[in-house]
Amino acid sequence: MEDQSLVAEIFLPISLIVIMVSLGLGLTPDDFKRVVLYPKGVAIGLANLLLISPLLAFGMAELFVLPAALAVGMVLLGSSPGGATANMFTHLARGDVALSVTMTAISSVAAVVTVPLFIGLAVSHFGSGLESDPEMLGIVARVFTITLIPLAIGMFVRSRRPDWVERNYEKARMAAIVVLVLTIIIAIAVEHDTVLDNFTEVAGATIALNVVAMTISFTVAKLSRLSDRQATAISMELGIHNATLAIAVAATISTQLAIPAAVYSTFMFVTAGILARIMYRRNADSEEPVAATATSAS
């Protein structure tokens, strides 16, 4: 229990802060302005990310009959924003990186409201399976402290020291990826007994959430007449959540809630890599130039 408390109170929040600062280093005010400039692509992407994904998480928790704590953790995962890694995979797939970055930025800010909201709904629906239900105002405060503040710090550093950020951004991003991997390993190690006891159900539910969310989001984007590059960006955002946020928030309540996000993180790069490989040639063969993809969103 002492080790779990140490992980929840110190390591995971610090890990998320490192990742969010690195994300902020890659953002500028223009990434937020695209909401007004190119509303269609951003609106469809955020609707998938902020509404469809959490609802799918509810559905998968029900379908796979997860215990209450794991069901709440599943919804927490589904309501988590996209992450910087989604931007990287969008780039590898020759998708619309500008759209991806904008969705990550907006959803990270919105997480202060959406994550506590869906946790509250999940606890009301499934129960928590814990000794006491989580206190929502405390979750709001924690999400704000470990996401928006470090995000703002990263953006501030970029605005004041753009040359330094340009030289060191790739190092910061790689450091964030290393921290993400360590966070996943530690989260699984701390709750290894529960992971092993529920692995089949949790793995099935998280894999289903990943594949279905990516498929639906890509389909919705195409039915909305967005380009392949934009559909790629939206699908990547749905496939690669900020799992560290889900794990960090979960661990401050109960490390059991972190299990779905930890298990999800072990294979989300595989499915994202497969999509990137499929879309790389398709996007490369498109006649529409990358710089113009955002324009068609309006």
Image: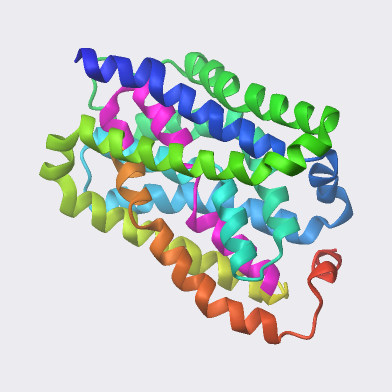
Q: Which SS does the magenta portion mostly show?
A: helix
Q: Percent from the top left, x then y, of residue 255?
A: 28, 27
| Bounds of the magenta segment | 229-258
Q: Using the image as rendered, state which of residue 277 and residue 236 is in the foreground.
A: 277
* Visible residue check, residue 126: no
Q: Is residue 297 above or below residue 285?
A: above
Q: Is residue 153 above or below residue 208?
A: above
Left or right of 119? Residue 140 is right
8 or 109, nearer to the observer: 8
Report the side of 21 relative to 289 (left or right).
left
Above or below for 98 versus 6: below
Residue 40 occupies quadrant: bottom right
The quadrant the N terminus occupies is top left
Q: Position of residue 144 (x, y in %)?
A: 60, 21
Residue 158 visible in the shown view: yes
Q: Quadrant of the C terminus?
A: bottom right
Q: Residue at x 43, y 54 (%)?
A: 56
Residue 176 highlighted magenta (yes or no): no
The residue drawn where x is 73% and y is 84% is 286
Residue 28 % position (x, y): 81, 40
Decide which of 220, 169 is in the foreground and name it: 169
**Based on the displayed image, in which of its 4 quarters is residue 237 positioned?**
bottom right
Q: Is residue 265 above or below residue 69?
A: below
Please tell me how many numbered marks the rendered image carries.
0
Q: Residue at x 62, y 54 (%)?
A: 87
What residue is rendered at 69% in x and 35% in y?
24
* Rendering quarter of residue 209: bottom left
Is 255 within the magenta?
yes
In the image, residue 176 lies at what x, y percent? 52, 39
Name the foreground residue: 149 vs 298: 149
